[in-house]
Amino acid sequence: MQLELTNLIYQFVVLSLVILFFISFVRFIYTLLTTQKKSVEHGANIEKKLDRIIELLEKNRTHQ
């Protein structure tokens, strides 16, 4: 009886650890993809701002 209870507890712990591993892995991948998406959006935003600055500088140069 004691051996069966120990075996049941062991299986529960191992199964819990496997489930926790997969949940952590999925969250890690999700965070990685979210961070990458934000980085790309940030780069595009900076590029738009630089284009606007260049446009204003060229406009200022033609007026002088």
Image (cartoon, rainbow, N blue to C red):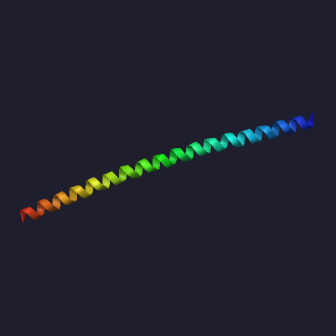
Residue 19's quadrant in the figure? top right
The residue depicted at 50 percent of the width and 49 percent of the height is: 32
Residue found at the very far right of the displayed protein = 1
Image coords of residue 27 (percent x, y) = 56, 44
Is residue 33 found left or right of 5 in the rendered image?
left
Image coords of residue 49 (percent x, y) = 26, 55
Residue 58's quadrant in the figure? bottom left
Quadrant that contains the C terminus: bottom left
Say if 54 sits above or below 7 in the image: below
The residue depicted at 56 percent of the width and 47 percent of the height is: 28
Residue found at the very far bottom of the displayed protein = 64
Is residue 40 found left or right of 28 in the rendered image?
left
The residue depicted at 93 percent of the width and 33 percent of the height is: 1
The residue depicted at 79 percent of the width and 38 percent of the height is: 11
Say if 15 sits above or below 48 in the image: above
How many marks the image carries: the answer is: 0
Image coords of residue 3 (percent x, y) = 91, 37
Say if 54 sits above or below 4 in the image: below
Is residue 53 found left or right of 42 in the rendered image?
left
